[in-house]
Structures are given as C-alpha cells and as structure tokens.
Image: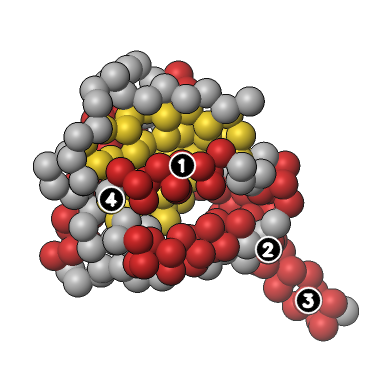
Amino acid sequence: MSTINDSTNPVTTDLCQLVYISRITSTGLSSPSTLNDISETAVERNHIDNVTGILCYGNGYFLQCVEGSEQALTNLKNRLLVDDRHKELKILDFSEITERRFASWSLRSITLERWMTKEPELKKLMPFKPYEWDSNEWQKFLDVLQGYYEEQTRTGNVDTPPVKYSTLGVTLSKVVGQHQAFFLIQTILGLMIVATLLWLLL
C-alpha cells in the first residue's frame, strides 16, 4: 500500500517539484526492458506535459525527481500509484520551486551503481537504501545529481536516450547487483573463449 507524505507547504505556484522513492516489484524485475520502457514512455509524455527530471535506480530502489506544473505532476503521481512495476511509493516532497534543477532533461535514467563509487558524496550513501536516509539526505543526493546534470549539460550530453540494458545484464544484476554484473559478464565471456580455444586444440 502506498504512503503519501506530501509537503505541508501549500502548492501555490505553477512550477513544482515532486520527489519520491519506491521499491521495484517482481513484475518490474521480470522484464529485462523495465528501465528502458519507463524512460522511453516518460520522455515522450514529459515532452508533451513540459515535465523535466531524473529517474535513479539502484539496489532494488527507485528515486525520482520531476519538475513541472502542479496539475502535470498530480497526474503523474496518480499514474505512479497504479504502476505495478514498483511498490511502497513514498513521496518525499511535493512543493513549489522557483526554478528547475534538470531543465534540459525530459527524463534522464541513471543506474546508480555504475558511477556512485566515483562520486565521494554519493559514496557516503552506499549501499543505496533511500528508505533508511535521514530526513535531509535526499536533498543532498539531489544536489549531487544536479552537479552531474550541469556537467553533462556543459559537455552537450543533453536529453540523450537512456543506456540500454541487455537481458543478460539485467538478469545477472538481480542476483549480484548491477555494479558487479558487468564484471561477471566479462568473466563468463572470457571463460567461454578459453573453453572454445581448448576444444579447438584438443
């Protein structure tokens, strides 16, 4: 059952921020294209609704920050509540803002384990367990992501498609964690090559 913790501050402007966390479900895990499907559908719809933001996934958890009009974000929130790819949705913030953090991203999808160890501030939050964070840690987390966004913007890497995840990569990531899946895949491929060479030599 979802838990709604809206900000106590009334929403009075037409530019708002919605931040929430949730857990991936078995339905979400069962499809190797879940992250791609979410991103591709959201980017198209967010363009229409003038919504921007970022979607983070790691360790079985989602954290999303989106920006737009109160009505657009309310509609998005209602869709999220009935999406069976995640559960235990908890809203950390739904309040007015003066400017967008991620103005050029209709929705950037980030798998956190791929780069958290390279960011000192994010490393402090590993393993990624947002339900266990203190009340203000999600704000620190977004500050780091905003810095990442600004760096990407400077390099011209704006609103690029999300990284594609192969079936093998996603399946392995369920078992060993996404930050280890790449290395496991490489090990398996290396062993297959060695086995093939030995078979040819015998």
Disc with the residue nearer the chain's start (1 vs 3)? 1
Q: Is residue 120 above or below residue 134?
A: below
Amino acid bearing label 3: Thr
User: From mark 1 to mark 2, how far is it between C-alphas?
Assistant: 29 Å
Name the one closer to the observer, 121 or 43.
Answer: 43
As helix, strand or loop, the secondary structure at mark 2 comes to helix
Camera-near label (2 vs 4) is 4
Q: Residue at x 68, y 48 (%)?
A: 29
Relative image position of residue 151 (x, y in whole percent): 17, 57
User: From mark 2 to mark 4, how far is it between C-alphas?
Assistant: 33 Å
Amino acid bearing label 1: Lys
Q: Residue at x 67, y 40 (%)?
A: 25
Which residue extends farthest top? 134
Crowding near pointer 4: few (<14 within 10 Å), some, many (20+)? many
Disc with the residue nearer the chain's start (2 vs 3)? 2
User: From mark 2 to mark 3, how far is it between C-alphas?
Assistant: 23 Å
Relative image position of residue 174 (x, y in whole percent): 66, 45
According to the image, label 3 marks what residue? 196
Amino acid bearing label 2: Thr
Q: Is residue 23 left or right of residue 138?
A: right
Check the picture and name the quadrant holding the C terminus. Answer: bottom right
According to the image, label 4 marks what residue? 68
> Tags 1 and 3 in contact by the CB under 8 Å rule?
no
Q: Residue at x 59, y 52 (%)?
A: 181
> Tags 2 and 4 in contact by the CB under 8 Å rule?
no
User: From mark 4 to mark 3, how far is it between C-alphas?
Assistant: 55 Å
